[in-house]
Amino acid sequence: MMKTDLAVLGGGPGGYVCAIRAAQLGLRAAVIEEQALGGTCLNWGCIPTKALFSATKLLSQASEAEDIGIAFDSPTIDLQKLASWKNRVVATLVDGIDTLLSKNGVEVIRARGALSSQREIVLSTGDRLTADHIVIATGSDTVQIPPFPFDHPAIWSSDDALTVREIPERLAIIGGGVIGLELATIYQRLGSRVLVIELLPEILSTADLDRRTVSTLKRSMTNKGMTILTNTAAESFETQDDYVVLKTADGAQHCVDRILVAVGRRPRTRDIGLEACGIEVDERGFIRVNDSLQTSVPTVYAIGDAVPGPMLAHKASSDGIRVAETLAQGHCQPSSYDLIPQAIFTDPEIASVGVSEAAAKAAGKATLVGRFPFAALGKALGMREPDGFFQVVADSEDHRILGVQIIGAEASDLISEAAIAVQSGLTLEAIADAIHPHPTLPEGLKEAAENALGRSIHAINR
Ligand SMILES: Cc1cc2nc3c(=O)[nH]c(=O)nc-3n(C[C@H](O)[C@H](O)[C@H](O)COP(=O)(O)OP(=O)(O)OC[C@H]3O[C@@H](n4cnc5c(N)ncnc54)[C@H](O)[C@@H]3O)c2cc1C
């Protein structure tokens, strides 16, 4: 029987970060991981998608460079090399986590674990681990829909899409959420003709995005040759000789080569002993937790994709740090999921933090809104990236910034300045009065803040 202070079940960005922080604070911590360290994020999520996103950006840049007098022959794509480079990026990071855990003195247990009591985990190796506290960080799984089973060779999950074994000539993607649209972007750049089928009236409907942001993305995607069908239910498919026919509820039939199902993820909370210990889950399988991320059993905490809230790696890590600090220091830092930034790797990228104008108004706030287009930024024009805009929403009384949305080049990197502003309660003036280097993309955020104050220099103020 092994014993530790903190046992963390799952070594994804929630679990490994929690264990490292706990060890830094003097606790003996162990991580139990049945697959690869780094979890979904490193192995099947954030990292492989972003590696492929950046690799395929080269293709779109090369195909458009002729306009500026630089021409390339048609690129050739060696899928095996592309996949092994992407795998090397993943492996480097996974190895790095192994090193970080060991240098911090965290014990890594390679096994499947399940709770056998409120302080004990039984391992697939036959051993048992007892701990003063347990953190459940088991993450999430891809949702499968019965008419489109993942064991059929024509049906892909996001994991299949990320192996990049083939480039289908015609790819249908069921689900116009973040994962579906990121993979749509990658495969469109690789040369697939992409059809996105979304059940709801709008794509990206679970994100709190301005209509203008979503319509800008839709216009850009359709201009690149993608077809986006909203209000459309994918019902079934039939296999023909060397293609499949996807049928939608409106009676239409779409001939495609592969169908990627990206309709969401569900918490991985089955068969880990929750019932036996009396740990409550909600109707969707998420573990119920209080504001300190403590479950209905006081010795057990739960974090990341296994609990309600945004399914994002940095949210999982933030949960992990909060739990480690609570256990080591005895108090929990307050946290609000409303202030967690999100980046969406489409073309153009989208990133947001805080609330949209509509959500601020719905909460009864009187707002000041400022915008600034990428097309008015010298840096963006020099990068040949004129699409998109910055939008800042602030409280009209005290000018506190409530939310920022950016659609355009490098939005995923640009949002961090806005995240500091929103999370620290900064005002429009704090951004507008800060001297930004020229020529850079972040000048767009400064100009949007100035625009909200009626004093943007490079845009006409309303
Ligand atoms: C295609 C895709 C792209 C994504 N892109 C982004 C992005 O760009 N940015 C972002 O923030 N998020 C992104 N995400 C979401 C992100 O991956 C998750 O929010 C994040 O990984 C959740 O972290 P976690 O630690 O809660 O769980 P996970 O990362 O899922 O880790 C859980 C770990 O627990 C292990 N485990 C589960 N059960 C057991 C058990 N019984 N015993 C032992 N081990 C167990 C699993 O093997 C896994 O390694 C993406 C997801 C996908 C699928």
Image: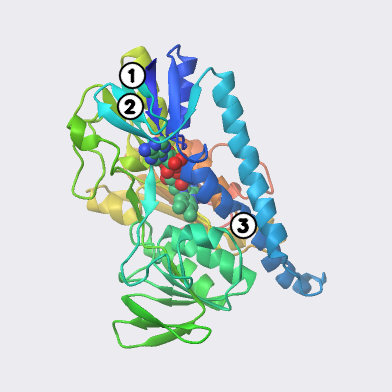
Write the residue at 53% across / 84% down: 242
Q: Are marks 2 and 1 in contact (CB under 8 Å)?
A: yes
Q: Which quadrant holds the C terminus? A: bottom left
Q: Position of residue 69 (x, y in %)?
A: 82, 72
> Badge 3 is on which residue?
52
Q: Are marks 3 and 1 in contact (CB under 8 Å)?
A: no
Q: Position of residue 56 (x, y in %)?
A: 65, 62
Q: Which quadrant holds the N terminus? A: top left
Write the residue at 62% across / 34% down: 95
Q: Mark 1: few, some, or many residues within 10 Å (few <14, many ≥20)?
A: many
Residue 98 sits in quarter: top right
Residue 136 sits in quarter: top left
User: Whereabouts is ligand 1, in terms of quadrant?
Assistant: top left
Q: Position of residue 216 (x, y in %)?
A: 48, 68
Q: Could you give the CA–CA distance between mark 2 and mark 3, rounded to whole angstroms?
A: 37 Å
Q: Which mark is drawn over residue 43? A: none
Q: Which mark is drawn over residue 121? A: 2
> Badge 1 is on which residue?
130
In the image, taking residue 365 as reference, residue 77 lies left or right, namely: right
- Which secondary structure lies at badge 3? helix
Q: Is residue 240 visible?
A: yes
Residue 205's place in the image compared with 355, above or below, is below
Which sits in the foreground, 211 or 25? Answer: 25
Q: Are marks 2 and 3 in contact (CB under 8 Å)?
A: no
Write the residue at 57% across / 51% down: 48
- Which secondary structure lies at badge 1? strand
Write the residue at 35% across / 75% down: 230
Which mark is in front, 3 or 1? Answer: 1
Q: Position of residue 257 (x, y in %)?
A: 52, 79
Residue 333's place in the image compared with 276, above or below, is above
Which sits in the foreground, 248 or 122? Answer: 122
Q: Amino acid at mark 2?
A: Ile
